[in-house]
Amino acid sequence: INETDLKDLGGNTEMLVDSYMELWESGKMNGRKKNVDEGKIVYTFALGSQKLYDWIDNNPALASYNVGYANMPTRLANIDNLISINQALQVDLYSQVNAESSGFRQISGNGGMMDYVQGAFWSKGGRSLICLPSTYTTKDGQLKSRIVPTFSPGTITTIPRQMVNILVTEWGSVSVKPASTWDKAEKIIGIAHPDFRDELIKEAENMKIWKRSNKIEP
């Protein structure tokens, strides 16, 4: 975190964690350029180390609000240049995002994800980033893709495709906010693990949302 060349960062989060403390203490985060709650990290609750809790105590740099304020999308949208970062479990080729379940098995709740996606989506100069590793490994050692053609039955769509802005894996980032269905599919396949791209192309063709003649050659 402290190796970033970013400066004058501002903070607004549902859950305050140690990384915010580290950014503030390093001088990279100070809230000076926030046009809403200037000079304050806004949060609802904290979860981290004892060092974090000691840092919170009587700290004038922090403002703890109820979730109705900290997560209100219309208030978040008033913060210029708001960049929200959320994590997902799966993304399909339509750009729908699952951050809650593995099929029918519930893993997490939606929390404030939609709030921060919407707030950043509407913010002047804002961007919403949804990040995920391109793969995971099963208990028996099988490599599986987190980029999938469509979600399996029972899977929860946490973020609908029309609200998705930027998707990020270790293979790159793509903006799907202005994209057509076939363009989204092509871009998303491009940030999938290379071992799964041919299979995803084949599935996209079967789904009739992409074909090789769509591809824009450089």
Image: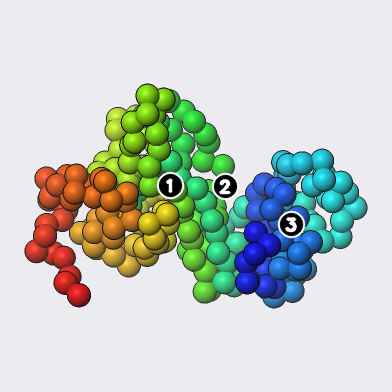
Q: Is residue 166 visible?
A: yes
**At label 2, which amino acid type do we have?**
Gly
Which structural element holds mark 2? loop
- The 10 Å Cα crowd at callout 1, few under 14, some 14 to 19, many 20 or more, is some
- The residue singled out by tag 2 in the image is 112
Q: Nearer the viewer, residue 41 or 140?
A: 140
Q: Quadrant of residue 30?
A: bottom right
Which structural element holds mark 3? helix
The answer to whether the residue labelled 2 contacts the one labelled 3, judged by CB atoms less than 8 Å apart, is no
Nearest-to-viewer mark from 1 and 2: 1
- Relative to 99, is 67 on the left or the right? right
Point 72% across, 41% down: residue = 47
Q: Quadrant of residue 181?
A: bottom left
- The residue singled out by tag 3 in the image is 22
Coordinates of residue 109 in the picture (x, y in percent): 53, 36
Coordinates of residue 9 in the picture (x, y in percent): 67, 68
The answer to whether the residue labelled 1 contacts the one labelled 2, judged by CB atoms less than 8 Å apart, is no
Coordinates of residue 4 in the picture (x, y in percent): 62, 66
Quarter of the image that includes the C terminus: bottom left
**At label 3, which amino acid type do we have?**
Glu
In primary-sequence order, the first of circles 1 and 3 is 3
The answer to whether the residue labelled 1 contacts the one labelled 3, judged by CB atoms less than 8 Å apart, is no
Coordinates of residue 55 in the picture (x, y in percent): 84, 51
Residue most toward the right?
A: 58
Point 55% across, 64% down: residue = 83
